[in-house]
Image (tube, helix red, strand yellow):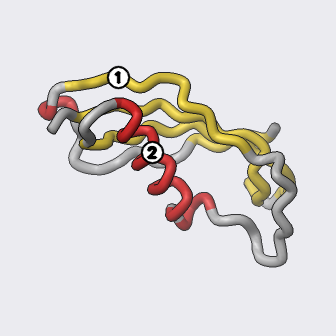
Amino acid sequence: MPWFKCFIRGENFPGQLIGAEGLFGFYTTRFIEANDAEAAETDALQRLQADSKRAPPLGYSPTGRAKVYFEEIEEIAAEQVPPVQTGFAWHPM
């Protein structure tokens, strides 16, 4: 099965960064083994939803403003897959 590199951008996620609360965006890359790019996108999105680093703060009520965009999905060789998934680069909106 091929591997895919998914470059992902998130916007308007509630959280706390360096003591400041508000809405934040993020960038991350996920490496997914899947049958095709569409399956890789679906799998990456499910993994993001389950990732505790992206969990909303306690007491948060969803607003529907948070969005995830797949900037790029490219098939890569298995040798290019890092042994550990990358983290998140957060920024204020």
Other residues around mark 2 within 10 Å, as few (<14) / some (14–19) / many (≥20): few
What residue is disc 2 on? 42
Q: Looking at the picture, does residue 83 appear above or below residue 41?
A: below
What residue is disc 1 on? 74
Percent of width and height locating residue 7: 47, 30
Q: Label 1 is placed on what type of residue?
A: Glu
Instruction: Say which residue appears at 51% left-offset and 53% top-offset.
Output: 48
Q: Looking at the picture, does residue 21 appear above or below residue 82?
A: below
The quadrant in which the N terminus is found is top left
Percent of width and height locating residue 75: 28, 24
Q: Label 2 is placed on what type of residue?
A: Thr
Q: Is residue 77 left or right of residue 17?
A: left
Single out the residue that lies furthest toward the bottom.
59
Instruction: Say which residue appears at 58% left-offset and 41% top-offset.
Output: 89
Number of the front mark, 2 or 1: 2
Q: Is residue 79 left or right of residue 28?
A: left
Query: Closer to the camera, 21 or 61?
Result: 61
Q: Looking at the picture, does residue 71 appear above or below residue 9?
A: above
C-beta proximity under 8 Å, tags 2 and 1 = no
Instruction: Say which residue appears at 64% left-offset and 40% top-offset.
Output: 68
Determine which quarter of the picture holds residue 2: top left
* Element on which disc 2 rests: helix
Percent of width and height locating residue 42: 45, 45
Q: Is residue 39 left or right of residue 55?
A: left
Q: Earlier in the sequence, mark 2 or mark 1?
A: 2
- Total marks placed: 2
The quadrant in which the C terminus is found is top right
Percent of width and height locating residue 32: 31, 42
Instruction: Say which residue appears at 86% left-offset and 53% top-offset.
Output: 22
Report, in whole angstroms, how far the alpha carbon at label 2 lies from the one at label 1: 14 Å
